[in-house]
Image (cartoon, rainbow, N blue to C red):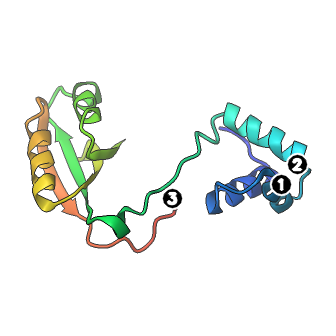
Amino acid sequence: MTELDEKDRLLLAALRQDSRQSLVALARHAGLSRSAAHERLRRLETRGVIAGYTIRIGIEDKAPVVRALIAVSFQPGKNCDHIVPHLAGMPPVVSCWSLAGETDLMLLIECASNGDLDTIRRQISLISGVATVQTHVALRTHFDRRD
């Protein structure tokens, strides 16, 4: 596991708050010089602690989005190697997590309508090796710590 000190945590917290901050602002937040902050950020990137910088598009303000979690269970003898490659080619499947327990995978789906959700759900159920598909539609996001 990667060890982070207090300065690293301060830099990461500032980036979570606003990843477009200037290096000077980030350094100030962490109590570092600009060059020390730059070096720490470079090391955090190299070690994989910072996997990238991105934006979030305000889709909720622009168009309706249906979000759902789909729980997938495999048929006996099947595993992620059989199923995940099919899911990776489906753009509405935003995230895919392996789970311990009766459910083998949990998928985060984002699509434009309930009809689109039904289509992707049917496509998933037809993948060879999928035993069950349970769909849980998200009604509202109370908070999202990824913001």
Q: Secondary structure at mark 1?
A: helix
Question: Type of residue at label 2?
Answer: Arg
Q: Is 114 in front, or is 107? A: 114
Confirm or deny contact between disc 1 and disc 2 (CB under 8 A): yes
Q: Secondary structure at mark 2?
A: helix
Mark 1 is surrounded, within 10 Å at the Cα level, by few (under 14), some (14 to 19) or many (20 or more) other residues, namely some
Q: Is 1 in front, or is 123? A: 123
Distance CA(mark 3)–CA(mark 1): 24 Å
Question: Type of residue at label 3?
Answer: Arg
**Chain-order first, disc 1 or disc 2:** 1
Q: Nearer the viewer, mark 3 or mark 1?
A: 1
Across and down, in percent, residue 53 comes to 59, 45
Disc 1 target residue: 24
Disc 3 target residue: 146
Residue 34 numbered tag: 2
Q: Is 10 in front, or is 25? A: 25
Residue at horizontal 64 percent and vertical 41 percent from the top:
49
Determine the image quadrant of residue 18: bottom right
Left or right? Give the position of 146 relative to 35.
left
